[in-house]
Amino acid sequence: MPDRSQAPHIKDAIEYAIALKKPEIFTLDNGVKVYNVNAGTEEVVQIEWIFKAGNWFEKSNNIASAANFLIKNGTSKKSAYDINEYVDFYGAYLNRSCYNETAVVTLHCLSRQLENLLPMVQELFLDAIFPEEELHIFRQNMKQKLEVNLKKCDFVAGRKIDEFLFGAKHPYGVYSIAEDYDALDVVALRNFYATYYQQGHCSIFSAGILPANYAQLMNGFFGSLPFNQSPIVAPEHLILPASEKKWNIINDPEGVQGAVRIARPFPTRHHPDFPKVQVLNTLFGGFFGSRLMNNIREDKGYTYGIYSFLVNHIHGGAWMISTEAGRDVCEATVNEVYNEMQALREGDIDPEELLLVKNYLIGTLLGDLDGPFHTIARWKNLVLNGLDDSFFYHSVDTIKNISAEELKAMANKYLQPEDFYELVVV
Amino acid sequence: MVKFERFMLDNGLKVLVHIDQSTPMAVVNVLYDVGARDEDAQQTGFAHLFEHLMFGGSVNIPDYDEPLQVAGGENNAYTTNDLTNYYCQLPSENLETAFWLESDRMLSLAFSKKSLDVQRKVVCEEFKEHYINKPYGDVWHIMRELAFKEHPYRWMTIGKELSHVENAQLEDVKRFFFKHYTPSNAILVVAGNVSVQQVRELAEKWFGDIPPGEKHKRDLPVEPEQKEERRMTVHRKVPADAIYKTWHMCSRLDDDYYATDLLTDILGGGASSRLYQALVKEQQLFTGINCYHFGSLDAGLLAIDGQLVKGVDIKKAEDAIEAELDKIRHGLVDARELQKVQNKTESVMAFEDMSVMNRAGSLAFYELLGDGELMNTEFKKYQDVSVHDLKRIANQVMQPSNSNTLWYLAEN
């Protein structure tokens, strides 16, 4: 019988060397860079076409997201159905997503079907026509979806906290209202598409088991499109945070839970404090064993889960705490969050707790680098933020070497209650 | 092709090993053959509450999460109506830590009163977050009760009502544990950068001396055949009307499962599916519509749900669904359309197998179905489905007398 009271010997995860596999990079004839992680166990591929076409670039609300969504809803030769049927027939997934700075078209398919699918993707970047009828359906469905979402306290809280942090006119703080959808018209969409997709700025990230002629294939389909021919001018947007810090909103008088958001502005990845605060954030509320989770879920049972995280935009960010808690314990939850901030500012972090967090972070990182899709996701983040793998290695070093004193200093610099916006939506 | 080896310990614990040396990590997945279907009708939500308690300390180890995190690992778990699955991933050199933790909580829990008190509250908040404080959150509570009269699929894993979880007592917890959390009721899968020899030694060392317990013999009531259409209407504070329809279908283990699965893809799997194209795009009656099934181990449900465009009459919307079902009951699906959903299935399977964690979970699930090897051979069964099978299943399953319809209407 083994001695169960004794934990088996472990190798501390921080003793592991971590390597981020470098992507292969090639450049198409038009200057578009293609980053590739050619690896994996399954015969599948993922390709992302990333355009500078996020809501940062739109002149009125929702143009960027509507253009991104409707890009596959019709070309001059094919209807939305034709396109969907074709993609589905080859067992592929063609998704779009729109962010603040970028908008993305993503293809997932079996490697052997790639040659059938690339011509279709090319057609979307050459010849999307944004039919009136498709916009009409989009508008109707999005408005109704919005109306449903507005019944959810967490959805409302997510919108409002961004507005407080960045201002309602800033791309990071703006949100949709029904009238924005009414105001959309196909001419504006077509213009946006022409500027930011057809003649836009594109970069490509691919991963999986890529065919031997991949570079040739990509150059053939995308190398002669008029991408990257002139620089895209990014407009200036001023951050105008709210002056009032504490907010209570009643969304549903009969709701049984409230959504709590507590957040402060925080610099981007380029700031020297960023990697240190990533470690502090993990300890504070960044994983299941965090102080917030241990106190507010595991000790008090106020919530199903509570997390803190860094909101990473390219031009500015935030440090946020987020949870849904029982309606009658929202206030107690908020107080406990501040108590945990105080404990980090004033108390000393136990060496065992610090080692646990370090091992956890490195262990997770090891697991996260498993497979080509995860590796390319890291690279995409680095490239889009104007960083390279030295940032990654610096973060790893910080995790391995940061001291309790440095973390306490970060807590004193950033976890000051008066810097935080506080919002409860019930 | 996912290769694995299998052996069994004397106490009845099945062990599967899948090696992948391209990763520095190891995954340990323990599946217990117990789900919400094994609960007492007066004590629903127990299997899921139990999943929470499994992290509240075991007989020799006060806390599960902490030592795992120290070893660079992370973990999670989920409960369904059929099973409970626990999985963790950690650097492979620390594999033994996972064996130590998993075996101790299979041996016995600490049964701490504090843990039970707190997790009751946590689960109640989970209940509120997902099923009360959300528009349309109570749909499946209502639909399950409408569709099942005898079988325990009539309640959800979170439980039938909050009070069942609120009233859970330590004695009940102990009884449930010793009945279901035994080696003979579990499947252990170890995957990643490991060797069979190593897993064999660790399994013997840590799990070998756990008493086998009694293999729980499941004896669930069989749901009687539904012979008459059932309908129900509710009014709720939601912005738009919605319609939910279900039909009884075969179990996951039935030969007809594959044709049924493909049938749901043809009707509601994505942007080129029949219901989406006809009812969202062409007729514009719905803002969204889905067709799917629950893949449950006992005979379960095939479902269609759709949210109506405001102002559309719900009877008209339902008739439009029926018109599409008529087409699939009376005509034959095009060969290309069948090929399409088979291709999609192949692709989904390939993407699912990308991570070691998923492969470990799938192996455990297929082993529960009877043989882990099914993971490698199942696609053949999808390829064997014919257009005639689809028609036969559509006629067998999607009949009004076998249907349950819920009109979920906006108040005023």
Image: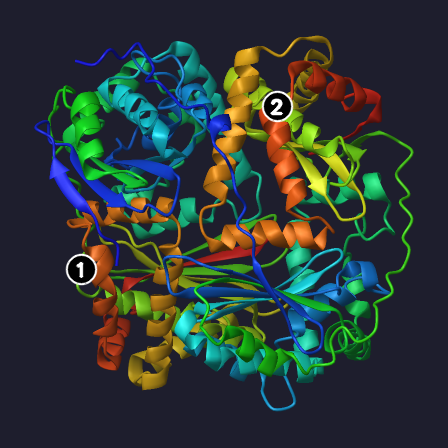
Q: Amino acid at mark 1?
A: Asp
Residue pointed to by mark 1: B254
Q: Amino acid at mark 2?
A: Asn
How packed is label 2: few (under 14 Cα within 10 Å), some, or many (20 or more)? few
Q: Residue at x 89, y 45 (%)?
A: A239
Residue A300 visible in the shown view: no
- Looking at the picture, how far across and down is residue A285, in whole percent? 61, 26
- Looking at the picture, how far across and down is residue A255, in whole percent? 63, 35
User: Residue A401 got which mark?
Assistant: 2
Q: Residue furthest left?
A: B10
Q: Is residue B31 above or below residue A97?
A: above
- Looking at the picture, how far across and down is residue A117, in whole percent? 50, 78
Q: Is residue A362 above or below residue B113?
A: below
Name the image quarter holding residue A340.
top right
What kind of element bears circle 2?
A: helix
Q: Residue furthest bottom?
A: A77
Q: CA distance from mark 2 to mark 1?
A: 56 Å
In the drawing, does residue A411 fall left or right of residue A349? Answer: right
Q: Is residue B380 above or below residue B196?
A: below
What kind of element bears circle 1?
A: loop
Do tag 2 and tag 1 residues touch (Cβ < 8 Å)?
A: no
